[in-house]
Amino acid sequence: MARIIITLFWLLCGVAVSAGKVTPVIITAGQSNTDGRVPDSMLPDYIKRDGFGGCMWSYGSGELSGKGSFEPFYPKVARRGGEALWGYDAVVYYRIAKAINREFYVIKESLGGTAVDPRCGSTQGMYWSAAPEFLAANTAADRGGKSLLKAFTNNIGACIDSVLSQKPGGYEIKAFLWHQGESDRLKAECYYDNLKAVVSYVRRYLVEKTGDERYNSLTFICGTFSSESRQRSQGVVDALKLLAEEDADFHVIDMYDGSLLDDGLHFDADGAVLFGNRVFDKLVETGAIIAD
């Protein structure tokens, strides 16, 4: 009940403050460290106390997939049974809420164990691939197909049509957040081309959907992996760094010092908080988020 009251308070404040202002939107995607693997009981006390302000999200991996609908944000993962989970992005949204003190939107698609390259093993046979031949042969993952990228962009489009385009002050997608790559480690030599194609596909989709050429240079922020991760691939890390060298709007956060859960793969609470704070700092540094 307390969580609901806090959410309603912030939403009412957000409506008053944001009238006439451009509504910020963040899009987020990836595999398990984007999904989040830290129990909600381990959210920092200050986040439990303050909540997520005016953050509304469309969690494409869940029941809202493809519907263009939003609900107040509180972290969860589309997995059967067990406690709700959170990841680094919950910290990002908390920091944004504190910085802008008004309504903003998140569109997220995530699934643990998924790869970009169709030649790699991937959960439920679903892939992020932007290869034209793969996209031509596969439908969206939320429609019985294998394409996570189509599910992601379809939901973005639905959100734009049903909600975001109705905002009095307009909307702007500020950044694309991503953490993925562990499942592509066996084809690390191809990750540069594969991820470059994913980012280009999403940027191009947004330009075509909105007619706004600025999305050709949409800010993209991703992270590397803990030095202790059992699935860390130097080849994938090198690909990320090369992409950042070539694209001024592609930003890599080194998470070599991120602490992990006992599984040796997923960020623990401290690691997720560290990553989330670094992502938020990068959003501010790039001008994607400007405090009101």
Image: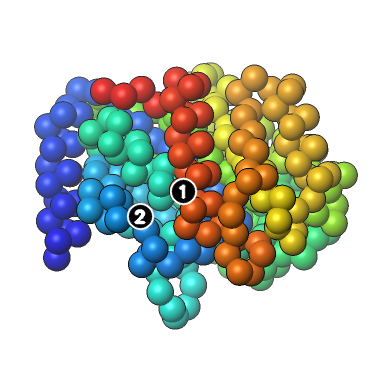
Residue 65 visible to an observer of this rendering: no
First-in-chain label (2 vs 1):
2
Circles 2 and 1: CB distance less than 8 Å?
Answer: yes
Q: Name the residue that disc number 2 marks.
A: 44
**Residue 291, image quadrant:** top left
Q: Nearer the viewer, residue 21 or 262?
A: 262
Residue depicted at x 60% and y 49%: 258
Q: Residue 13: where, in percent of width, then height?
A: 13, 38
Quarter of the N terminus within the rendering? bottom left
Q: Nearer the viewer, residue 165 or 281?
A: 281
Q: Name the residue that disc number 1 marks.
A: 273
Secondary structure state at the residue bearing disc 2: loop
Q: Residue 37: where, in percent of width, then height?
A: 51, 64
Q: Looking at numbered disc 1 in the image, what kind of residue is underneath it?
A: Val
Residue 245 visible to an observer of this rendering: yes
Tell me: 32 left or right of 157.
right
* Residue 266 to residue 225: above or below: below
Q: Looking at numbered disc 2 in the image, what kind of residue is underneath it?
A: Pro
Residue depicted at x 47% and y 63%: 38
* Residue 282 to residue 136: above or below: above
Q: Residue 137: where, in percent of width, then height?
A: 73, 56
Secondary structure state at the residue bearing disc 1: helix
Q: Nearer the viewer, residue 104 or 63?
A: 104
Tell me: 130 left or right of 277.
right
Quarter of the C terminus within the rendering? top left
